[in-house]
Each structure stands twice: as structure tokens, then as C-alpha cells.
Amino acid sequence: MAGLTSLPGPGPDPVEDPGPTTLRLRELLRRDDHAARSTLFLRLLYSPAAAATAFALAATDDALPRATLALLRDLDPRLLGLEQRARRRQLRWHLARELPLLPRLVPDAEIDAALASFLDAPAFWEGAGRTIGESFCLHLVSRPTLSEPTRLLVRLAAVLSALANRPTLPSPWPARGPALALPEARATETLLSGWRLVEAWRRVERGGFEPGSPVGEGTSLTVATVDGDGVVRVAALEVGA
């Protein structure tokens, strides 16, 4: 395609078998409307992988509109990289505020790796959770490196944060355990598991839980509630041996 010599370098080669992220970028690149270009620009501001893929596709795709090519030519790759790093730091700071105990459950390196892929995931762009923190936790627990008790505790952390901030929205988590309607609670969420999660959560609050450490098997129904004053509580009901 003529005139693409002024585009930033494409970075890593795009994946030969494009996944949903690449296909979505190709759709945005080919659409000739303001909404598509705004969405594309926002994706590039957050994701180095999306930027590299977009520049690579732009260099080989003859169906791109002139306005989209002009947008890509105007981007300074150095400044774009600075903006991406700043937005990632801001998101990391927000997650630390919303989920302050998450670093006690998951090592920092695992959180950073999950955050990098989160910026290209539907969970981020489509708002899978009730809050951005819950959306991140939905993405985090999909990673194969977490132990089962850690996944459950990450889910519990997300639920407690969501109940505190957006209690009227439906839960995005698969139902596990019976639904309870407590008259004194504004919202209630339950989680049936083979681990005593409340006991483990208390250890997390005291700073004594390590990722992957055994927390005691059993059959427990964990109940998280929020009252009319926004106070969130968690309790356990033993339902079997």
C-alpha cells in the first residue's frame, strides 16, 4: 500500500491465526466512521499488543479508510508508549485501592502478567464485572497458574468489593451454592466450596495467608452480605463434613 512508510514500525509479527482481539482490531480498522476510530484510538492508548497488531495490519490491508491511515500516521510511537505505561500504572493503582488484599493472595509478578493480558481481554473492554476490579478478577481466575483455593479467595475478594460498590447489579460469577434472601441484607451472594474460605480470608486480613497454602478442606457455604449502610460482611455455614 502506497504511503505507509511514515507509519510506526509494526513491532512483533501479528499472530498467524488471529484471535478475537485481532479480528476486532481488523473490524475497527476497516470501518470508516468516527465511533470506530475513537474506539480504535482508545485501544491503542492502553495496549502495546493492540498497537503493534494495528500497525502491522495497516501495512498490509488495502481496505483501510484514509482517515484511519491518517490517525495511525499521526501517532508518535514513543509518546504512545509513554501513554500506555501511564494508563497501566493508573489502572494498577486503582486495582490496589479496590482490592487491597489481592497482593496477599497472588504474587505481584502474576498480577502484572494478568494485567498485561487483561488490557486485550473482553473482560476489560466489555465490562464483565460489576466493577473494574471484579472484571480483572474474572480474568485473573481464568489463568491456569492459580491454585483452586486462591481462585476462590480471589473470587471472594471481588464479590466483597462489588457488593460494597455496586450491590444492585447481578453477579457475573457462576452460581455455586443455594441462593439466600436475608431480610436484613440489601444484597446477598453465596459460594459453596470445599475450602473454609472465611477462615482463610481472616488469615489474609492478618497477613498470614500464602498463595497455594492449604487452608483446610471441608464443605462450607460462604455468605457475603451488604446492609443498607454499605457495610459488607462475610460468614461461613458448615453444611457437611
Image (cartoon, grey):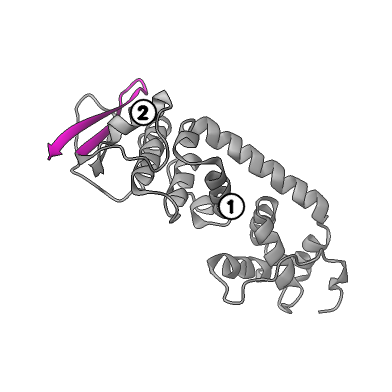
Q: Is residue 18 left or right of residue 196?
A: right
Mark toward the viewer: 1 or 2 = 2
Chain part drawn in magenta: 220-241
Residue type at mark 2?
A: Arg
Disc 1 marks which residue?
A: 119
- The CA span between labels 1 and 2 is 31 Å
Image height of 70 relative to 159, above or below = below
Q: Which mark is residue 203?
A: 2
Q: Main secondary structure of the magenta part?
A: strand
Residue 187 visible in image: no
Name the quarter where the C terminus is drawn.
top left
Closer to the chain start, of discs 1 and 2, is: 1
Residue 215 coordinates in the image, percent (x, y): 30, 37
Residue type at mark 1?
A: Leu
Residue 56 coordinates in the image, percent (x, y): 73, 70
Q: Is residue 74 in the magenta section?
A: no
Residue 205 coordinates in the image, percent (x, y): 40, 26
Q: Residue at x 55, y 41 (%)?
A: 108
